[in-house]
Image (spheres, rainbow, N blue to C red):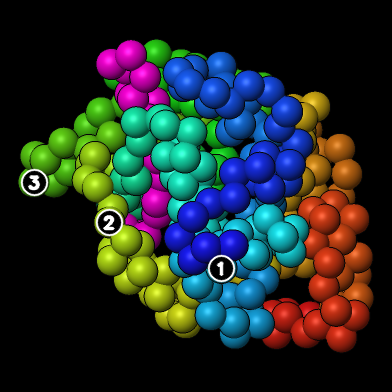
Amino acid sequence: MSRDVLDIDSYLARIGYDGPVGAPPTLETLGRIQMCHACSIPFENIDVLLGKQIKLEMADVQQKLIVDKRGGYCFEQNGLMLSVLETLEYEVVGLSGRVRVGRERDFTPPRTHLFAKVMLDGVPWLVDVGVGGMTPTRPLRMDTDEPQETLHDTRRIIQGEDSNGLARWFHQVLIGDDWQDVCEFSGEWMPQMDRGIGNWWTSTNPESKFRQNIMGAMAIADGSRHSLSTNQYVRRSAGVVLEKIDIATSEQMIRVLADRFGIELPADTVFGIEGL
């Protein structure tokens, strides 16, 4: 593979997409690719815990996520998606964001999230395949605050202001009766240099959650989701727990990663977290 050219056929085979991809770009194709990606390439941070460098060059991302059938986090996942959509001639740009899952509004998380904004017939759409268990499984309109149904949950995008009166938007998910923030963004472009800085902080700073926890997440085409958080694996659908596995050893973790996420690791892998 070239260092900077995407092998689109290998990518489509990896996610199991066999629909049309020719011009002109359509919302239907965009949505199907996003769903297939979210159900095929897991969100995970294993290499961060193993002390491996997270490389964002397209050849490295392709090798890991496509050839080696691994997963990754937002800079890898959405970096790949941006390249896919550019190759398929979508009008797309990578935007920066702050992940707000589990955070109160008075807390400011680092701007270490990358996602895609796609324009189709003058309408802006949010495409994000790299926000863990909160990854949306279809494009979301960015020009309305109305709720938007997906196979896995209900979403919306609302506008607000920060403490300085500057505009910001919140991508939210409906959990029970409550709207909870997934991420916030200002609409600022995230160039490759900024992605590199965010990737470095996320993967090397001891305070980064990616250095402190084992993470895994992947959508399932039946509307449920795989979720892994250090010592526990859960499969949920609409808030209902369908399966749960408590994990106490590295051997158990390796089996869960293989059986539920398709991630094959050496039998002697040691994660360095919670005795694993």
Residue carrying label 1: 60
- 245 over 18 or under it: above or below: below
User: Tag 3 or tag 1, which sits nearer the N-term?
Assistant: 1
- Nearer the camera: disc 2 or disc 1: 1
The quadrant holding residue 115 is top left
* 203 is within the stretch colored magenta: no
Asked which secondary structure carries label 2, the reply is: loop
Residue carrying label 3: 164
Badge 3: residue crowd in 10 Å (few <14, some 14–19, many ≥20): few
Q: Give the Cα distance between marks 1 and 3.
A: 40 Å
- 26 over 4 or under it: above or below: above
Q: Give the Cα distance between marks 2 and 1.
A: 18 Å
Badge 2: residue crowd in 10 Å (few <14, some 14–19, many ≥20): few
Q: Which is more toward the observer, 104 or 182? A: 182
In percent of width and height, residue 41 lies at 68, 49
Q: Give the range drawn in magenta.
A: 107-126
Residue at the image point whose x is 80% and y is 27% from the top:
222
Single out the residue that lies furthest toward the front: 2
Tell me the amino acid under the disc marked 3: Asn
User: Tag 3 or tag 2, which sits nearer the N-term?
Assistant: 3
Q: Principal SS element in the magenta part?
A: strand
Tell me the amino acid under the disc marked 1: Asp
Tell me the amino acid under the disc marked 2: Pro
Residue 67 at least partly seen: yes
- Nearer the camera: disc 1 or disc 3: 1
Residue 153 at least partly seen: no
179 left or right of 121? Answer: right
Residue carrying label 2: 191
The tag on residue 196 is: none
Q: Give the Cα distance between marks 2 and 3.
A: 25 Å
- 168 over 10 or under it: above or below: above
The quadrant holding residue 8 is top right
